[in-house]
Amino acid sequence: MSNPAIHDTIDYQNLHLSDWLPTSVKEMKALGWDYVDVVIFSGDAYVDHPAFGAAVIGRTLQAAGYRVAIVPQPNWKDDLRDFRKFGVPRLFFGISPGAMDSMVNHYTANRRRRSDDAYTPDGRHGARPDYPTIVYSRILRELYPDVPLIAGGIEASLRRLSHYDYWQDKLRPSIILDAPVDMIVYGMGEKPIVELAGRIEKGERISDITDLPQSVVLRPLDEMPIPDSDNIILNDWKSCQRDKRLQSLNFKHIEQQSNRMHGAVLWQRYGNQVVRVNPMLPPATTEEVDASFDLPYTRLPHPRYKGKRIPAYEMIRHSVNMHRGCFGGCAFCTISAHQGKFIASRSADSIVAEVRQVCRMPDFKGYISDLGGPSANMYSMHGKDQSICGKCLRPSCLHPKPCPNLNTDHRPLLDIYHRVDALPGVKKSFIGSGVRYDLSMHHTGEKEVDEANRTYNRELISRHVSGRLKVAPEHTSPQVLNLMRKPEFSLFHQFKNIFDRVNAEEGLNQQLIPYFISSHPGCREVDMAELAVETKQMNFHLEQVQDFTPTPMTLATEIYYSGIHPYTGESVFTAISPEEKLAQRKYFFWWDKSNRDDILRSLQRLHRPDIAAKLYPAYRQAVSKSRRRR
């Protein structure tokens, strides 16, 4: 059971430096310690909050009885004093490179260097290197060659096997070949890291620990077994370098095993060595998820940042995450590769206790910015028959159609909303995470469930929108949406009708803000032109848009790299060159006068005067006059 009292231990009026994990030797000694068990090097600023990975792992190890220190954003360019200050830990060094892949954090879709970093004080850039997993581990290995070195987090997790790196525009090996770590703990790492600490403490050598769930290790080639139902042998590194089709085939296995309840061990050969990827643990129980979120986080940045603003923290400081995992399986998304597709939900008591803690924050004004999760409305959802889920290899429970075994009942979620809104101090709770409207609109044929889901849509729109509700149809083209594993655009039309009707009935003036992606695999320029027409007809001037950015371990990235769909073997067109990408992106901004002439020339080249006429009525009139003159 959850322990809400843990949250009540935080007194925001009387916080002391000792309420955070130590970041300096001075802080360590103030706690009465003369050593630490684990030192975590983080690519992010240290924010003691359950949304920041270093804090989660640090607090988890602390709860297990270990002494943990954090070195946030160490200086890797000077005399390396940040890497030396705590000396040798009793158990191991940990590397938590950041809440985002460093290359996504540092570069735009056009490979241009960003000028800011949301996970750094005052948003300044340059506080972490590219690929901190590699940079930090090489420094630590040189300084402390005999100390176990463990990497985790998004960057290491999603690069655990051979992968395409968009920023270097080449296939790269498993990151464990470039980063001299003893082990990668991938995914949500609380259980594996505690087990690992316990085994090292009992005297096991790190080189002998090869069976830890959710771990990646580099082993001698002679340990690779004959393939069977428990061991999948992937195409080896050299073969993947020679033939993109073999890399594509690997991805199918990787994705399927990441989304299995009980996966197989994956093996990939690199010369005379082999990378072993042990399967994910089954989804965490409610008690296990509660235990993580109920740890005594201050929910605040470390006092060392006093007077400085950390943008990523500002976005979530008054929000509460209710669950982990996502069964949407979108082709461009990495959530299931890291958190799994099975939903692990917190108890209502744990969620309410955290909201109470937010209410006590000195700067809280009564508004919860987000009661959400990776997808806001998947809370407490799972298969009706779990034995079916245990055998399932589908990467998505929603595409091409919602699985008939999926329980889509939104009543547990509504109960949470009602409990939170009834709390003293809460004026309103908003839903800032993405909502899967195909889930809330799904007709099950079960009267009570369908009625509850209709109620959810109405309450979401009338009570939980802070003026603008963001949803992600992503595209309008049927073939592109199918490759994206997203529902048909007609469903967005239906949801917009519901949104408009509820606004009218409630006397509200709220906006529906759709997200769209250009240059996704399968998308051609004419698809973007048709997107422009359809969204114009719906009276949208698009603002939440992006050019597709290939990131490691997604279906869309594998298609982008190989030109082949891993599941069908068919060739798929993808815009690759900057010119092709720009030619697609401009249609988002058809209404900008500076784009008009270029778009008209492009539509003439595409032989689509019908689209030109729909986008620019003046163009149609001009053509009509020209024809009359002739």
Image: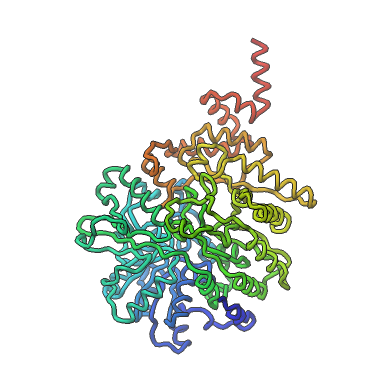
> Residue at coordinates 38% horizontally, 50% vertically from top-left?
165
Out of 1 and 309, give the one closest to the viewer.
1
Is residue 342 found left or right of 278 in the rendered image? right
| x and y, in percent, of residue 105 in the image | 47, 57
Task: Give the farthest residue toward the bottom.
Answer: 32
Task: Give the farthest residue toward the top.
Answer: 630
> Residue at coordinates 65% horizontally, 60% vertically from top-left?
411
Up/down of 157 relative to 298, above or below: above
> Residue at coordinates 33% horizontally, 77% vertically from top-left?
199
Q: Count how many numbered circles sit on residues in the image.
A: 0
Is residue 162 found left or right of 424 in the rendered image? left
Q: Is residue 420 visible?
A: yes
- Asked where in the image residue 379 lies, by quadrant, the reply is bottom right
In the picture, the quarter occupied by the C terminus is top right
| x and y, in percent, of residue 71 in the image | 43, 73
Q: Is residue 105 visible?
A: no
Up/down of 413 relative to 89, above or below: above
